[in-house]
Amino acid sequence: MAQPPDDAAVEALNALVDQLMRTRAELGQAVERAHELVALRNSGHTWVEIVRAEQRPLIIERISQALDDLGVAGSRFRREEALALAREDVSITDISKMFGVSRQRVSTLVQEQAVPPA
């Protein structure tokens, strides 16, 4: 069966894939930076020297932002997927079992309006 061209769940999934790729790149850079920080510390620099010399955003800020952005994209896909399943007449109970969450959570998901992509 062909998918409708305006399938919001597919759009949300594509946005999630894009965000996953950005997150992977961000986290890869964070790994490299973490190794640099360890090397600086092991070479005798104090933490105050290291942190003061580090350019903004700090490593932890970059990681937090990357994970926040991924969470937004993941939530959007979950919501759109739940809505798509509901449109296909899958019960709230069955969706909750598929997602491993409560029926109340699924009910909230299908009642929320989809958030436009960032």
Image (cartoon, rainbow, N blue to C red):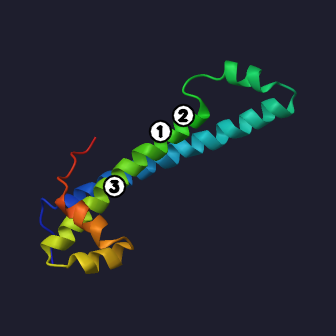
The quarter holding residue 83 reads bottom left
Q: Kindly report the distance in space between the C-alpha atoms of the residues bearing marks 2 and 3.
A: 21 Å
Q: Nearer the viewer, residue 25 or 69?
A: 69
Q: Describe residue 8's horizontal placement relative to residue 14 as left or right.
A: left
Mark 3 falls on what kind of element? helix
From what the image shows, is residue 13 above or below residue 103?
Answer: above
Q: Where residue 78 appears, x then y in whole percent?
A: 31, 61
**Amino acid type, mark 1:** Gln
Q: Kindly report the distance in space between the C-alpha atoms of the residues bearing marks 2 and 1.
A: 6 Å
* Circles 2 and 1: CB atoms closer than 8 Å: yes
The quarter holding residue 99 reads bottom left
**Amino acid type, mark 3:** Ser
Circle 2 crowding by C-alpha within 10 Å: few under 14, some 14–19, many from 20: few
Mark 1 falls on what kind of element? helix
From what the image shows, is residue 10 above or below residue 53?
Answer: below
Q: Residue at x 64, y 43 (%)?
A: 31
Which quarter of the figure is the C terminus placed in?
A: top left
From what the image shows, is residue 114 above or below residue 107?
Answer: above
The quarter holding residue 81 reads bottom left
* Residue position marked by numbered label 2 in the rendering: 61
Q: Which mark is residue 65?
A: 1
Q: Residue at x 72, y 40 (%)?
A: 35
Q: Nearer the viewer, residue 113 or 55?
A: 113
* Residue position marked by numbered label 3 in the rendering: 75
